[in-house]
Amino acid sequence: MKRNRLLSLFFFITVSVFGQQIQLSPEANISVLTIGPGESLNDAFGHNAFRINDSSRGIDVVFGYGEYDFDTPYFYLKFAQGKLNYLISRHSFSDFYRFYSLYNRTIQEQVLNLSSDEKQHLYDYLVNNYKPENRKYLYDFFYDNCATRIRDVAEITVKNNIEFSKPSNFEPKTFRQLIHEHVGLNTWGSFGIDMALGSVIDKQATPYEEMFLPKYIHQYFGSAKIHSSENLVSRSTVIYQKREQKTTDNFLLSPLMVIGVIAILILYITYRDFKNKRRSKWLDISLFAITGVVGIIMLLLWFATDHTATAKNYNLLWAVPLNMLVIGQLFKTQVKNWFKRYIKFLIIMLCLLAMHWIIGIQIYAIGLIPLLLALLLRYMYLHNYFSKQ
């Protein structure tokens, strides 16, 4: 009985202590951490997090946004649909530092110039946000990610008293151009992004919208004012500097090279068909099947998911889903007249794509250039071939 009373008392004390919100000391610091880009595509854009450092309370923790749980049921399906819940994370600063320094990624720290009440408010907000019932949120790459959450939480907790100013060297850029700053134009990462994301990201981003990228959080926070006159950042330091390493770009495996070789093969077969006055059915069936399947995937990303950035994707002008429905004509020696007109339609779509690219309605992956030229010449040959039947 006595033992049970002691256990009950211990439980009561534990719940009381940990159930109460920790009060930060006047010496506490809250800072924004900016992590430099990593080697893989998902790390290419960097990361942001809040650090709460209060040595007198024994607190040195980092809160960040953008983690996900691989144990989520139907993880990949939800990810593809844009319905995957992301999480706020909490780690000790020592573990956080050890992880990013191990992967040789620069860590910059900006100590925020906040009052004691504002520090407490921000800390309380993060602790409440970390509760199991509040941790999950739907992620959006451009408007609700690990960087924008840092900006938004900072604004909420200081009651929108932050003024972000446009840098003197500000150059208007589209969302796609901002992405290309982090992934080279002739990389498979850039190729995939330019294929999957539509014309909605070819609009100009405002200075405020640029803060979807961690490096711009660091830049805009560094020049921001709080309460109209004071600097938002009181101190900025680099707490880990990336070691310079030799990097080699293998052009032979780049999209432009790989797809260029495929395009040359298509052109060679087309030339051989022209000389021999015949048609390689296997090539046409393969091209229609591949472009049709790619088009269906893009169509699903546009209309069957919650991703905002995959809308209005005019890659459908070359990756035409209808190709899958008409592919049966390619097995025949004599094709229907409507199919001849369809080939002309495909040629017009490629010309329209070129106009889109020149005008700037949508910018396409440069690795596609050889393939688009090869498709155009192949379609022109097919139109001429079928017209003689």
Image (tube, rainbow, N blue to C red):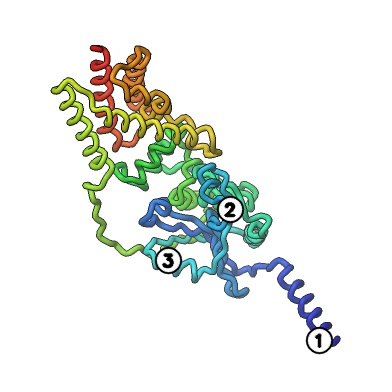
Q: Viewed as shown, does residue 257 lie left or right of 99? A: left
Kind of residue at disc 2: Pro
Q: Residue at x 38, y 30 (%)?
A: 319
The reply to whether dot 2 and dot 1 touch (C-beta < 8 Å) is no
SS under mark 1: helix
**Cα separation between marks 2 and 1:** 43 Å
Disc 2 or disc 3, which is closer to the eye?
2
Q: Residue at label 3?
A: 239
Of 60 and 18, which appears nearest the observer?
Answer: 18
Disc 2 or disc 1, which is closer to the eye?
2
- Please say whether residue 274 is visible from this viewpoint: yes
**Cα separation between marks 1 and 3:** 50 Å
Q: Quadrant of the C terminus?
A: top left
Estimate the x, y position of residue 184 in percent, counting from the top left: 32, 45
Dot 1 crowding, Cα within 10 Å, few <14, some 14–19, many 20+ = few
* Mark closest to the chain's N terminus, 2 or 1: 1
Dot 3 crowding, Cα within 10 Å, few <14, some 14–19, many 20+ = few
* Mark closest to the chain's N terminus, 1 or 3: 1
Q: Residue furthest right?
A: 1
The reply to whether dot 1 and dot 3 touch (C-beta < 8 Å) is no
Q: Residue furthest bottom?
A: 2
Q: Residue at label 2?
A: 73
Estimate the x, y position of residue 70 in percent, counting from the top left: 53, 57
Q: Residue at x 65, y 49 (%)?
A: 159
Q: Residue at label 1?
A: 3
* Mark closest to the chain's N terminus, 2 or 3: 2
